[in-house]
Image (cartoon, rainbow, N blue to C red):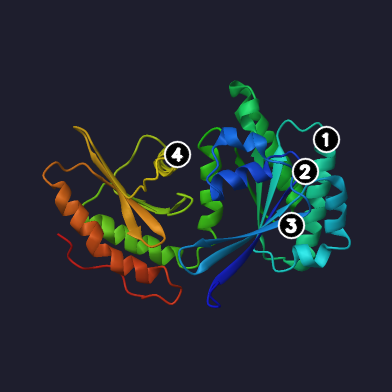
Amino acid sequence: MSSTAMKKKVLLMGKSGSGKTSMRSIIFANYIARDTRRLGATIDVEHSHVRFLGNLVLNLWDCGGQDTFMENYFTSQRDNIFRNVEVLIYVFDVESRELEKDMHYYQSCLEAILQNSPDAKIFCLVHKMDLVQEDQRDLIFKEREDDLKRLSRPLACTCFRTSIWDETLYKAWSSIVYQLIPNVQQLECNLRNFAQIIEADEVLLFERATFLVISHYQCKEQRDAHRFEKISNIIKQFKLSCSKLAASFQSMEVRNSNFAAFIDVFTSNTYVMVIMSDPSIPSAATLINIRNARRHFEKLERVDGPKHSLHMRMR
């Protein structure tokens, strides 16, 4: 691994059986939801390194949630586990029968974070929401979110409802990774310029391996608030289907009477999706514009990349 890589330590914690390893396997190891049933319990701490956007590396610590391990994290392993943490992701099983113990362990984590990594960002995932009756989900999540925010003080926590069976898992992890990208504002500025230059309705940037949405810009209001995560899920499943046939996914064009959608390899670490509704712009022009922008966005992925914006004429 390059010495210039920007490493970010991410703790993934929660009680045994809360679903930590299943979600990690879906996001980072290309599992589909039904295949996670064969995963065993995590023993102690499993380390993995996930490279994002060239220089950003997530140093992911998946911490086993059995009582013995949890107690060790707060005593003999305290400094090792909780030092230099950028992000704590704590997973709660929404149907846990030991909610009081879950909250106790979460508070112990917060105390250790305050002592060792006071600037860490805190995220709580209220998981397995698919097991809750649909008409009760909003209420139950709101109650749990209020409790967690109150318990987290003086630290701030961001809560997400998640399930491995729908797009909520991608929404949560996209939001988390977004906050770790070092030059995200510059990236968004250039994505906005790119969209305006090519007269796109919307442009999305996906991380290549996980297909998490890392940036987007929209010029026109869209109806589906969950479209990013749905697209992530659909395309990732399609990529997996391709790989089973010894084929590789590179690009796709979908067109109807209202719009055209282009998904294409963009940089060495990203895919781009461009939505166009102007029927006078031919597909070839959009594909040429995507190709012409690649070199500029490749440079942006490096932390020391260019500080200027994309202003070139592309059509």
- Residue of label 3: 154
The label nearer to you, 1 versus 4, is 4
Contact (CB < 8 A) between labels 2 and 4? no
Residue type highlighted by circle 2: Lys
Residue 140, placed above or below residue 83: above
The label nearer to you, 1 versus 2, is 2
Residue type highlighted by circle 3: Pro
Inspect this view and state whether residue 197 appears.
no
Residue type highlighted by circle 4: Gln
- Residue of label 2: 15
- Residue of label 4: 237
The mark nearer the N terminus, 4 or 3, is 3
Q: In the rendering, which numbered label is found on residue 98?
A: 1
Distance Cα–Cα, label 1 vs label 2: 9 Å
Give the camera-side residue of 274 and 21: 21
Residue 10: % across, % down: 65, 59
Residue type highlighted by circle 1: Glu
Distance Cα–Cα, label 2 vs label 4: 29 Å
Give the camera-side residue of 253 and 93: 253
The label nearer to you, 2 versus 4, is 4
